[in-house]
Amino acid sequence: MAQEELPWHASLPAPTRTAPLFKKEDLLRQMSILGDLLNAGTLLIDVRRTDYEGGAIKGSLNMPAQSFYQNMATLYRLCKGDGMMVISRVMFYCGSSNGRGPRCAGWFADYVAQRGEADGLPETMIEPRVFTLEGGIKGWVAGGPPYRQLVENFDESYWMQFAEVKTAGKRIMDTSMDDANDEWTGNGDENAKRLRS
């Protein structure tokens, strides 16, 4: 009998913290006002690996989830800069932010909290703050043109595989992807774009 293959994260500890969700509408508003989020102290981390296709949110850093745990200390040092916290907020996303994104955000939130506690900081003073982008890249792209304009190397043909052409001639993006196994599980809604999570 063939042995069942374990998921990539099976040998790693489960995160103890859950990073709060950050709404895409709020991020879009901030990007519209501030332009470059990095200059405003926000770092976006895209943890996709094999599905790192179709573009990425402007200014994102790609750190695949499968190697993220081993690189958390380096990310923390980059956020810390030369002693002053230069990055005050780190936001993670993956395909739909149902698996890899929240897991990496949880690991990093654990790491940041441990470092803050070791430095004797109260929890309210610990930085960077860690979030998961609600809906991931699929939710972002499903938001329509204002969001897609902020996707570097946006490849419409890639995203069309997730769209359904309705009888009214409108294309509806369905973002109900189960991030754990990367298979689409639902159908689009004829009246509105919606994100199932």
Image (cartoon, rainbow, N blue to C red):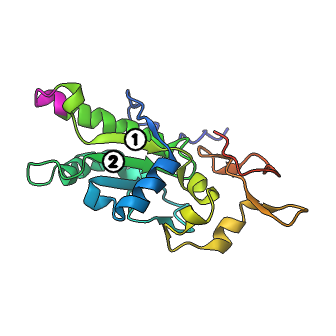
Q: Position of residue 150 (x, y in %)?
A: 49, 66
Q: Position of residue 78 (x, y in %)?
A: 20, 54
Q: Is residue 144 left or right of residue 42?
A: right
Please tell me which residue is depicted at 34% across the width and 44% down the height of the picture: 69
- Are the residues tagged 2 and 1 within 8 Å (C-beta)? yes
Please determine whether, in this image, residue 170 is positioned above or below residue 104. below
Please tell me which residue is depicted at 63% across the width and 51% down the height of the picture: 182
Please tell me which residue is depicted at 57% across the width and 68% down the height of the picture: 54
* Magenta segment: 116-121
Q: Is residue 52 left or right of residue 37?
A: right
Nearest to the observer: residue 99 or residue 60:
60
Question: Type of residue at label 2?
Answer: Val
Give the crowd class for mark 2: few <14, some 14-19, many >=20 residues within 10 Å: many
> Is residue 117 shown in magenta?
yes
Question: Type of residue at label 1?
Answer: Phe
Secondary structure of the residue carrying tag 2 is strand
Q: Which residue is identified by label 2?
A: 90
Mark 2 or mark 1: name the one nearer the start of the chain. Answer: 2
Q: Which residue is identified by label 1?
A: 131
Q: Position of residue 19 (x, y in %)?
A: 41, 35
Res. 8 in view: no
